[in-house]
Image: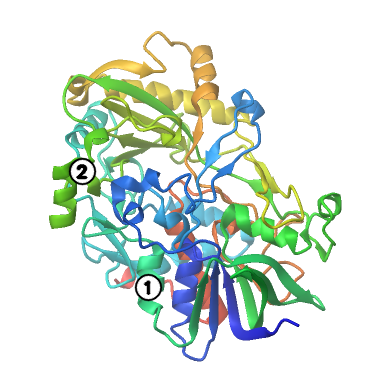
């Protein structure tokens, strides 16, 4: 007979949110916290060296997901890297520190009916978690666990593209997380002195010696235990055996927008008809689990270059010597060094496009190493209308779930991305960047007109790896959690990860996900954050 260990809070998933949540909860010595992670250690160079990020993809530190065939993309399946390692996707991402627009959080407040999700109220959480190298002001904090810095050795093409975008009519923006998001500039990154600074680095490793925190890696959670309508613990596979962990207070799922809905459904919590189809006993009919999936789609425009060396040549003896020595040089690059927020149409109230400018050829999600020196403008739609879903393929927890991203199921997304390709070409044709670029490799200068560009978007669209909303907050019948992140209809069970976002934010999702964990820690510990702190810094 299995014996059950007792904890106060069991957190499932040591990713961006789970590490932050476990770290914050364990600050209270009265709380016994268990953190379960299916993956392993993050102590490998491919995680620590920023420019090596894509070398972790498709390895055992990656869940290595693939979507279903996408009708909007001509039946193509897309690769979705998700971190299966301490730090989760913050250990394999491009480290871009973006919060999103203030309007995103005000929309969350409207959709949840809870003003505590407005930008005024979440800004203090962002300030609290941040240690910004630029110092503290009304938009930024210092002394928090998450180190945020400017890139130490930006590429010369990065500086050129900023000047070219300004020449093309875009405003310069020195801080995408400041007073306004719109404009062009260099990204800040979650790095510390040229090294990746993941959520595990920020929150988990400093807490590792706390006696009230237990961390288990290689532990696959197979189901949430529910008794009398209350979550009482979890079952998990670890060291070749099935174990039980009891939670006296709460179970919190932080597996992300794919694994969290999968675990809920494996536990019998989800759309009843679907659960019966795959042979799972229904514990609680909750139709919205797995529904409403959103992701940021990306379309690359690539140019060959006439002069200079791209980041494809970063791995040289001198490059490694600079990184191991002073933590400088091309290996400190996050690849997507500069960005732009703009509108696909002038009548829009907020930017709906984000550009990532890469001084390297980024093609087919880095399935093969770059073969030539090239420059990439990656156009990303950040106000997405299309929706997809996560579903089970099997009642076996080792099976990957079915992921239908729903790309381009809404024509508005297609038209916006076409506008982005046109704007990328305008930027490349003016200013100093034009002197570096040669011919357009993809889609190619001969591809003109909106119909041809629509076809190109369908043929070349990829994911920016920002899935959210599959267990979204809300009050309607398809909402999965309430505004306090509690699963509707099941006591003692919360979700704290990107899956709860009511909508995508305008920008990269790592910082907002960590913010959600900070909020969850406050909710579990019964604390509140005064919005006046947002202006007191």
Gap between marks 1 and 2 measured at Cα = 27 Å
Residue 394 at x, y percent in the picture: 76, 51
Identify the residue shown where x is 42% and y is 68%: 125
**Do residues under tags 1 and 2 come within 8 Å of each other at their CB atoms?**
no
170, 376: nearer the viewer = 376
Q: What element carries label 1?
A: helix
Position of 141 relative to 183 (above/below): below
Q: Earlier in the sequence, mark 1 or mark 2?
A: 1
Along the line of sight, the residue nearer the viewer: 386 or 156: 156
Residue 153 shown left or right of residue 365 in the figure: left
Mark 2 surroundings within 10 Å by alpha-carbon count, few (fewer than 14), some (14 through 19), many (20 or more): many
Task: Tell me, yes or no, if residue 518 can be seen here.
Answer: no
What's the residue at 48%, 86% (across, down)?
212
Residue 123, position in %: x, y? 41, 64
Q: In this view, does 361 lie above or below 493?
A: above
From this viewpoint, which residue is outermost toward the front? 240
Q: In this view, does 332 lie to the left or right of 523?
A: left
Residue behind mark 1 = 205
On-image quarter of the N terminus: bottom right
Q: Is mark 2 on a helix, strand or loop?
A: helix
At x 37%, y 61%, the residue is 198
Residue carrying label 2: 330
Percent from the top left, x then y, of residue 63? 54, 51
């Amino acid at each position: 007979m299995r014996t059950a260990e007792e904890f106060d809070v069991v957190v499932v998933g040591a990713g961006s949110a789970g590490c932050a949540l476990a770290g914050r909860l364990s600050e209270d010595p009265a709380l016994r916290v268990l953190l379960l992670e299916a993956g392993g250690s993050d102590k490998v160079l491919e995680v620590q060296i920023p420019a090596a990020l894509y070398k972790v993809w498709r390895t055992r530190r990656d869940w290595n997901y693939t979507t279903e065939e996408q009708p909007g993309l001509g039946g193509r399946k897309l690769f979705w890297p998700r971190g299966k390692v301490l730090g989760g996707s913050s250990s394999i991402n491009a480290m871009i520190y973006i919060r999103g627009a203030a309007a995103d959080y005000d929309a969350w407040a409207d959709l949840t009916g809870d003003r505590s999700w407005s930008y005024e109220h979440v800004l203090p959480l962002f300030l609290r978690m941040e240690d910004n190298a630029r110092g503290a002001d009304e938009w930024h904090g210092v002394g928090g666990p998450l180190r945020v810095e400017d890139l130490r050795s930006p590429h010369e093409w990065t500086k050129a593209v900023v000047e070219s975008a300004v020449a093309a009519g875009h405003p310069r923006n020195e801080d995408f997380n400041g007073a306004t998001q719109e404009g062009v500039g260099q990204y800040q990154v979650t790095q510390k002195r040229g090294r990746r600074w993941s959520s595990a680095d920020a929150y988990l490793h400093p807490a590792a010696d706390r006696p009230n925190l237990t961390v288990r890696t290689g532990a696959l959670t197979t189901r949430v235990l529910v008794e009398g309508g209350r979550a009482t613990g979890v079952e998990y596979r670890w060291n070749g055996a099935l174990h039980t962990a009891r939670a006296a207070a709460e179970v919190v799922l932080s597996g992300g927008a794919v694994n969290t809905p999968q675990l809920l459904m494996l536990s019998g919590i989800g759309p009843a008809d679907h659960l019966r189809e795959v042979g799972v006993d229904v514990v609680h009919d909750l139709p919205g689990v797995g529904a409403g999936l959103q992701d940021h789609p990306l379309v690359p425009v690539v140019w060959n270059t006439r002069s200079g060396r791209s980041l494809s040549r970063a791995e040289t003896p001198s490059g490694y010597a600079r990184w191991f020595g002073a933590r400088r040089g091309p290996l400190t690059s996050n690849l997507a060094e500069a960005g732009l927020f703009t509108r696909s149409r002038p009548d829009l109230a907020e930017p709906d496009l984000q550009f990532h400018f890469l001084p390297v050829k980024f093609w087919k999600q880095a399935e093969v190493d770059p073969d030539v020196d090239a420059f990439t403008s990656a156009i990303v739609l950040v106000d997405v209308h299309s929706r997809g879903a996560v579903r089970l393929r099997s009642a076996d927890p080792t099976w990957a779930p079915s992921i239908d991203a729903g790309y381009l199921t809404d024509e508005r997304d297609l038209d916006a991305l076409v506008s982005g390709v046109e704007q990328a070409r305008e930027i490349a044709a003016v200013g100093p960047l034009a002197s570096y670029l040669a011919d357009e490799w993809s889609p190619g200068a001969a591809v003109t007109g909106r119909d041809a560009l629509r076809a190109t978007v369908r043929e070349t669209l990829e994911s920016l790896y920002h899935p959210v909303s599959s267990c979204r907050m809300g009050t309607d019948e398809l909402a999965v959690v309430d505004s306090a992140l509690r699963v509707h209809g099941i006591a003692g069970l919360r979700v704290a990860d990107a899956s709860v976002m009511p909508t995508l934010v305008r920008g990269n999702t790592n910082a907002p996900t960590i913010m959600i964990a900070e909020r969850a820690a406050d909710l579990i510990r019964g604390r509140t954050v005064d919005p006046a702190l947002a202006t007191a810094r």
